[in-house]
Image: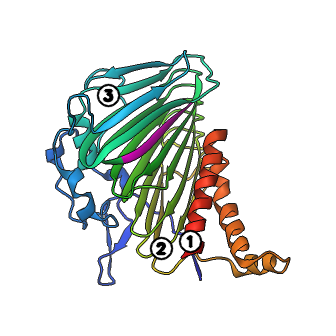
Amino acid sequence: MTTTTQAPATVPGSRPHSDGAGAFVPVQTRSERPHSYDPADFEIPTGREVNWKHAPVARLAPLFEDVAADDRPGDPAVEYAVTAPEAVVVGSLRAGEAPRGDVFEPEDRVAAIAWRRTDEALHVRIPRDVELEAPVVVEMSGRGADRRANAHIVIEAETHARGTVLLRHAGSAQFDENVEVIARDGSHLEVVSVQQWEDDAVHAASHQARVDRDATLRHIVVSFGGGVVRVNPSVELAGTGSRGELYGLSYADAGQHLESQVYLFHKGAETSGDVLYKGALQGESARSVWIGDVLIGPDAVGTDSYEANRNLVLTDGARADSIPNLEIETGDIRGAGHASATGRFDDEQLFYLQARGIPEDEARRLVVLGFLAEIVQKIGIDDLEAELFDLIEAELAQEVSR
């Protein structure tokens, strides 16, 4: 069975939600959420809040504690390794040292804690007019599921710069993470965040980006590992002619919770946005959550925007929640739409393949690979694409062996 939703557009402050008793009441939209750098300004989530209602707050509870990282002499809770082409400038920024904070404003307790508890933010800067031939790779390896770590990373592409920054997460940790992204005029920046944690890791990340005039940001979230992984990108298309491409790929196994709340704000004129997240789920209690919010502001004339989420449920007991939302504050746009679909295998596709002599297990494998390949092939890093196809094959082999 497949379900598809095409949610209606709303105006700020009017989006309805169920109160649990069948009634629909207005709620605060994504654009109206409070912001603060002080964790005390945010209550500890209970799961009733609009931005936490789909999250396993009990499992995330360690990240709500305003505590320092569990770093030890010569043994950090999360170890960093940065590999960068020679032209890239890698440094650090303290709070109040620009461009840290030029874009980022925490909108929940976890992000505010990460801001406050990170003394030195990692700063990756691609200088003006530089075009990178190889990606910047930031590898983060957790040293233990009982150890807390906080991070703030600033990624900056200066005017007319072009390049890719790959963030890789592995090992185990309780990890609060902020990622601040600035794509200046005419730049073309790709940021890829890959989560390959061990099953006992808990990771909550807030990515906030600003895209300036005639610049393009391609932002890709890939989540395969981790017990609970919540990566929420927020992108402001601030400059005239700016473009945002937001893509995501997840594969949830038994007991995993993989979540992304995506926000795309068309602020400037003649901006364009493309949002596509795809996920596969298998195993008892495998869970994915995708919430997509697009705001087309009053000055965003000539906007062209579309967002979609597709989920493939492979086994009983898995669940995917998918909620697209759209706010439009100007009537002068080229186009805007949103949709989501969640379902099992397409019986017609399986029948077509089996009718041509392909065994059922192989047919199922081909369907899943074809479904997820669209996102993998957008990454543009050959080695990583090959690695992800191998991971998908390994996940499918586990499903077949059950």
Dominant SS in magenta: strand
Query: Is 180 above or below relative to 98?
Result: below
**Disc 1: CA contacts within 10 A as few (<14), some (14-19) or many (>=20):** some
Q: Is residue 167 magenta?
A: yes
**Disc 2: CA contacts within 10 A as few (<14), some (14-19) or many (>=20):** many
Query: Is 268 above or below relative to 279?
Result: above
- Residue 144: horizontal and vertical position, in percent? 29, 47
Q: Where is mark 2, residue-wise?
A: 283
Query: In the displayed structure, does residue 116 sit left or right of residue 9?
Result: left
**Disc 3: CA contacts within 10 A as few (<14), some (14-19) or many (>=20):** many
Rendered-image quadrant of the C terminus = bottom right
The earlier-in-sequence mark between 3 and 1 is: 3
The stretch of residues the image draws in magenta is 164-171
Rendered-image quadrant of the N terminus = bottom right
Cα separation, mark 2 vs mark 3, equals 38 Å
Q: Where is mark 1, residue-wise?
A: 399
Cα separation, mark 3 vs mark 1, equals 40 Å
The answer to whether residue 269 is visible is yes
The answer to whether residue 309 is visible is no
Query: In the displayed structure, does residue 200 sit left or right of residue 298?
Result: left
Query: Is 356 above or below relative to 73?
Result: below
Q: Where is mark 3, residue-wise?
A: 121
Q: Is residue 347 magenta?
A: no
**41 or 295: which is nearer to us?**
41
- Residue 288: horizontal and vertical position, in percent? 45, 65
Q: Amino acid at mark 2?
A: Gly
Q: Secondary structure at mark 3?
A: strand
- Residue 394: horizontal and vertical position, in percent? 58, 60
Q: Amino acid at mark 1?
A: Glu
- Residue 10: horizontal and vertical position, in percent? 45, 63
**149 or 308: which is nearer to us?**
149
